[in-house]
Structure formats: C-alpha cells, structure tokens
Amino acid sequence: RLANLVRQKGGRQIGGSEFLILNQQFNTLIKAGLPILKSLDLLATRATAPRLRPVITQIRDRVREGKSLSEAVAEAGVFSKVYSTAILAGEKSGNLPGVLDYYIAYQRVSTGVQKKILASLVYPALLISVAVIIVTYLVTGVIPKFALLYRDMNVELPAPTRLLIALTVDYRLVFLGVVASLAVAAAGIFLWSRTEEGGTVFDRFKFRLPVIGDTLLKFQVAQFSRTLATLLTGGTPLVAGLQTSCDAITSKLLRSTVSHATQMVREGESLHGALGASGHVPELALDMIEVGESSGALSPMLNSVAEFYEEEVSLRLSTLVSLIEPILLIFMGLIVAFILISLYLPIFSFSMTGTAK
C-alpha cells in the first residue's frame, strides 16, 4: 500500500499528486485569510479531478452542519488517519496552515521516495516480462511445430532436443499442473500473509533475508519515522502520534512492535527504550531517537532517521538493480539459447551426416 494514495469508497483510488494539489490549494486559501467553509466551497467548485469533487462537497456539508474539519475529513472515509490527526493537531494548536505545510512537505518527500523506488524496479520488471513473452511464444508456437517435424522424420534426436520436447509437448499437462500448483500455493501464502498471524510470520521471514530483508525493514522504519515526525511537528502528543503512526504502518510485525511500544510509552517508558525492547528496530535508529529525546529535539531527529534510511534504501536498490539487470540478461540469454540450440541441433546433425556421406 502506497502512503501517497487515499482510497475512495468502492475501492477506487485518488492519486497522490491530486491529493497533494488539493492540500496546496486549500492551504493557500487558508493562508489568504478565507474561512474554512468558504475555502471548501471554492475547492468543491473548482476541483478538476472528478473523483475529488464529491469528497470535498461531503466534507464541506459536514463542516456546514457544525462538524470540525478533522471530524469531517475522518468521516469522509477516504483519507488516511495521519491526515485527519494532523488536521486535528492544527485545529487544537490554532496553526492549521503551519501543520498543512508540514503535511505537504511529508507528502512530497514520501511520494518522491516511492517514485524513485518504483522507477528503479521498472527495467527489471520489463526484462522479466519480455522473457516470459518470448519463452511463451517459443513453447506454444515454435517447439510443437518442430516436434511434429522430427516425429515425421522418425530419427534419433539428441538428448537436449528430447528433453525440450518432453517438457513442453509430451509432458505439457504435467508441467502446467506443476505451474498451477505453484501458483495456487503462492496465492495461498499471499492470502495467509494478509492475516495478522500470517503477516507477522511472513514479515519475520522477509526481514531476515540477506540484504533485501534489511532494506525492507529500513524502508518501513523510515516511513514510520517520517510519519511520526510530521505529527509531532504539527503538535500531536507523542502517544497519539504513535497510535496514528501505527495505523499507517504496512508491516504487521513493525505495527505490532509500535503498538506494544505505545503502551510502554503510555506507562512512562522512553520511546527508544520501548522500541528497542522488541529487537526489530535498527540500533542506529534507536541511538538517534535517544539523542532526540534527551536533547528535546525528537521530531527533527526522527526526520533525520527517515532521511538517512531513505537514502540508504535508495542506494541499495540502485546497487541491487545494477547487479540484477546483467544477471537477468544472462539468464534470459541462456534459456533462449538452450531452446534454439535444442531445436536446431538435429538439423545441424543431419547436415553434417549428409555432408560426411
């Protein structure tokens, strides 16, 4: 789940860029001195995104009925709890424009990091897609024709050719059955990972993977730190900020960790001590949080944690992609080469035999 998306009723999604523009426009109107209700009226009238207009209209109507802006946003059911909590903090502090500034900066950074990560994965995904298309075409359209040709010739085929034909023609149903079984198993694991227990176990497994696991964990910690820093900067109390940040975490293991830490902080434990009790938060992050608590600069230090890990995750992904790309190319080349050589090997053998005679 991307942090820069808000979900509309019925499962539709509003792009992060649309949401960012909405916040910028709303904040500009508030800073200009317009009342909240008048600002919502203007936004509802001039909204260019059709999906946003009914949402803004609903919020405006709730505010007109006497609801606070944070209550109206929460009741809309399409925005994250982080957003409604940030607005609530702005209302309580009397600094709604300032809080919206913090939230807009949070949106920009989060969206930028996510776009950078997705962009780094586009090329490997494209390579895999091309490989699947090529192999599928060869297996379904080319190999069966060669198999019929060689059977009509009634000749002894080389071992690689026999293996290729057996896998793709003679035992196709068995092969497809194995693939289907693997797909069903993968779907079952995916559905199980969506449960609380399964997700926690799956997260433990993911985070223990070499290189990739540590990268995934640090990305989650960066997202949590960025969210909590935004809420604290806007004036949200620590315990309330932890509760809201917990709801925004996608990892069930880290969510459980933060939930337990929230209870410990409520009972008087320090934040770094509460998070460190789980053993799932990196030591460097704990050390930086401890310094932030002792110096009274927790929010800036959480931002520093987020920036440090976001940069590290981006660098690691770039390195991994630069390593994966040649490996994928070599792997694709070997598969296609094996198929083509196996198909044409009998023809080469016949040619050499005919020449020898």
Image (cartoon, rainbow, N blue to C red):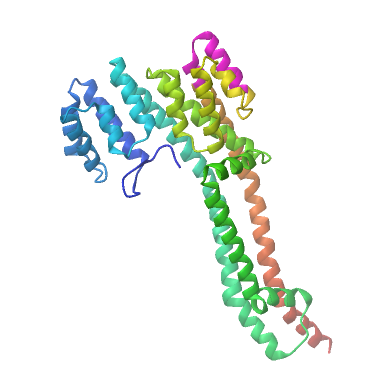
Type of secondary structure dominating the magenta stretch: helix
Give whichever of 245, 29 is nearer the camera: 245
Give whichever of 349, 289 is nearer the camera: 289
Q: Is residue 167 in the magenta section?
A: no
Residue furthest right as drawn: 356
The quadrant the N terminus occupies is top left
Question: How far across and down, in percent of the image, does residue 40 sit?
Answer: 19, 32
Give whichever of 346, 207 is nearer the camera: 207
Q: Quadrant of residue 112?
A: top left
Residue furthest top as drawn: 295
The vertical placement of 232 against 216, above or below, is: above
Question: How far across and down, in percent of the image, does residue 33 sit?
Answer: 19, 20
User: Residue at horizontal 25%, vertical 25%?
Assistant: 28
User: Residue at horizontal 61%, vertical 73%?
Assistant: 139
User: Is 19 left, or right, of 53 in this rendering?
Assistant: right
User: Residue at horizontal 57%, vertical 63%?
Assistant: 132
Question: How far across and down, in percent of the image, does residue 344 sit?
Answer: 70, 77
The vertical placement of 88 against 151, above or below, is: above
Q: Is residue 293 in the magenta section?
A: yes
> How many marks overall?
0
The quadrant the C terminus occupies is bottom right
Q: Quadrant of residue 65?
A: top left
Write down the region rendered in magenta.
Answer: 284-302
Q: Quadrant of residue 256?
A: top right
User: Residue at horizontal 25%, vertical 27%?
Assistant: 69
User: Is 69 left, or right, of 204 in this rendering?
Assistant: left
Question: How far across and down, in percent of the image, does residue 227 sit?
Answer: 45, 27
